[in-house]
Image (tube, grey):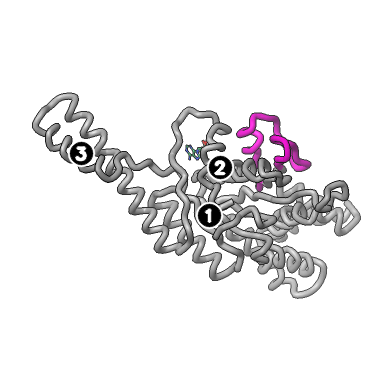
Amino acid sequence: MISLLSHRVVFVGGKGGVGRSTISAALGLAASRRGLRTVIAEMNGSETMADIFGRGPVGYAGGELRPGLHAVSITPSAAVEEYLVRQLKFRVLYNLVFGNRFIEPFMNAVLGLSDLISVGKVMDLEWMVDATRPSGLAWDLVVVDAPATGHSLSMLRTPRTMMDITRVGPLYQNARLIRDLLEDHRRTCFLGVSLAEEMPVQEMSEMVARLRAEVPIELTGIVVNGVRPRPFDGDELAAFRAFERWAARHHGPAEDAARTARRMVHRRARHEAQIRQLAATADLPLVEVPLLPHGRRAEDLLDPIALRLEPWL
Ligand SMILES: Nc1ncnc2c1ncn2[C@@H]1O[C@H](COP(=O)(O)OP(=O)(O)OP(=O)(O)O)[C@@H](O)[C@H]1O
Ligand SMILES: [Mg+2]
């Protein structure tokens, strides 16, 4: 049984454009409505939540989207500055390292420091205390609108990479703390998002395989988003086939209608084939979220999506 809301941190990941932000928003909204004080963490300084919920940018300090639902937009440079200033106490050291055009690329590109610290910031949200709340915690749930596949993978791997490189010292200690939380199955999990199409399915299957091999984070399941509904069920399909044969003998509107319906049947069949492929390769539970009518405001997508996620909450 999947129970996303029993975790403290849920990473939502998948290929670019498949609906990670929309699923994160729907999950966050559902959690907050159940009384969990929830924060959605966006990475790379994006402000999609502000757009979806129709408010101004939330920035690194964060802002409220709805009662009990907040967002923060984590910018790597802001996270690194906050971390180093806190760790090193002296801003001058920060300037020395990050004002140096030779050192900075090395710290970021080679060591993945800004990725580590961005993940560290997510984990900071999990640790954040609030003495005024009965739980003593600022957030009951952190939903991470994770970056697209490749970057998510390197981000989730980065605590281990940093531990391998450093072996001792404060960076090692920090990386270990982050790794321990990331890989604690009771507290942290990963929720995949894919479309029922060839490329996203392939990318999700590869991502799951890589995570299994390299980062033992708990893999809960995969949301298959934007699935075309089945146009006909059981008896209806048999009736449609009969109509199709009849329409083939009668040109005009009947034939056009049959052609349109046939396209819907084929599209659904292609989606089903991809869903079977994903189920077989990723070997994880799947939940389907239908393609909702175009032209709806992004926020209006959230309730029907949350309803589909309900069994996994
Ligand atoms: N089930 C759905 N039905 C209809 N439209 C959807 C559905 N899910 C997402 N969308 C729309 O698809 C677009 C992409 O979704 P979203 O921004 O959530 O994807 P993403 O994976 O976060 O993309 P990016 O890689 O750019 O961050 C948005 O316009 C969103 O409103
Ligand atoms: Mg997004």
Q: Amino acid at mark 1?
A: Gly
Image position of 163 with respect to 147: above or below: below
Residue 178 shows up from this direction: yes
Give x and y (percent) for residue 22.
56, 41
The residue under label 1 is 192
Residue ID at (87%, 50%): 131
Q: Do the CB atoms of the residues marked 1 and 3 lie less than 8 Å apart?
A: no
The crowd level at tag 3 (other Cα within 10 Å; few <14, some 14-19, many 20+) is: few
Q: Secondary structure at mark 1?
A: strand
Q: Which mark is residue 239?
A: 3
Q: How many marks?
A: 3
Give x and y (percent) for residue 50.
66, 34
Residue 45 shows up from this direction: no
Does the stretch in magenta take in 112? no
Side of 223 where 183 appears, left or right: right
Give x and y (percent) for residue 48.
62, 38
- Tag 2 or tag 3, which sits nearer the N-term? 3
Quarter occupied by residue 64: top right
Q: CA distance from mark 1 to mark 2?
A: 15 Å
| Magenta span | 42-71
Q: Quadrant of the N terminus?
A: bottom right
The residue under label 2 is 306
Camera-side residue: 56 or 85? 56
Quarter occupied by residue 27: top right
